[in-house]
Image: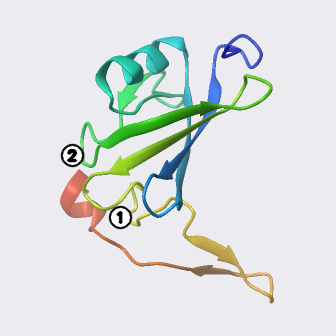
Amino acid sequence: MIDFDKCGGLVPVIAQDAVSGEVLMLAYMNAEAFRHTVETGKATYFSRSRNRLWMKGESSGHEQEVEEIFVDCDGDTLLIKVRQRGGAACHTGHVSCFHQRLTEDGGWATVGHRVFDPKEVYGS
């Protein structure tokens, strides 16, 4: 059902808060990350920059408990509804990775607020 071959072994994954409906982040999974997610009930992704699996929250403790998983009609994108633990999905400390909004003058405005200080969680 999931076409991992279509995009070179990875599929984009949209993580959405299961309660509020807010889009939290976009990441990628390969088949192994998908299996691990299903087996553990915790969102596990494939890091393209580190070239390895990573369970969301492995360093911050801000895990994502998976409530539901959906696949799109083409079989090449996943939507996972999660319960975000620790209050923030973004490594910047914001609830959502999508916390920059384009303004009318073409600039960017930060929306939302920081839940944690990344220096305290990840170090310098």
Q: Secondary structure at mark 1?
A: loop
Amino acid type of the residue that numbered disc 1 sits on in the rendered structure: Gly
Q: Where is residue 13, by image quadrant?
A: top right
Please name the colour scheme applied to the rendered image. rainbow
Q: Where is residue 82, by image quadrant?
A: top left
Q: Position of residue 52 (x, y in %)?
A: 43, 20
Image check: 36 left or right of 123?
Answer: right
Image check: 73 left or right of 62?
Answer: right
Residue 16 shows which numbered tag? none
Residue found 74% across the figure and 84% down from its top: 103
Which image quadrant: the N terminus? top right
Decide which of tag 2 and tag 1 comes sooner along the chain. Answer: 2
Which image quadrant: the C terminus? bottom left
Q: Position of residue 22 (x, y in %)?
A: 53, 62
* Residue at the extreme bottom of the image, as rendered: 105
Residue found 57% across the figure and 63% down from its top: 98
> What residue is disc 2 on?
61
Image check: 1 left or right of 55?
Answer: right
> What residue is disc 1 on?
93
Residue found 80% across the figure and 82% down from its top: 106
Amino acid type of the residue that numbered disc 2 sits on in the rendered structure: Gly
Q: Secondary structure at mark 2?
A: loop
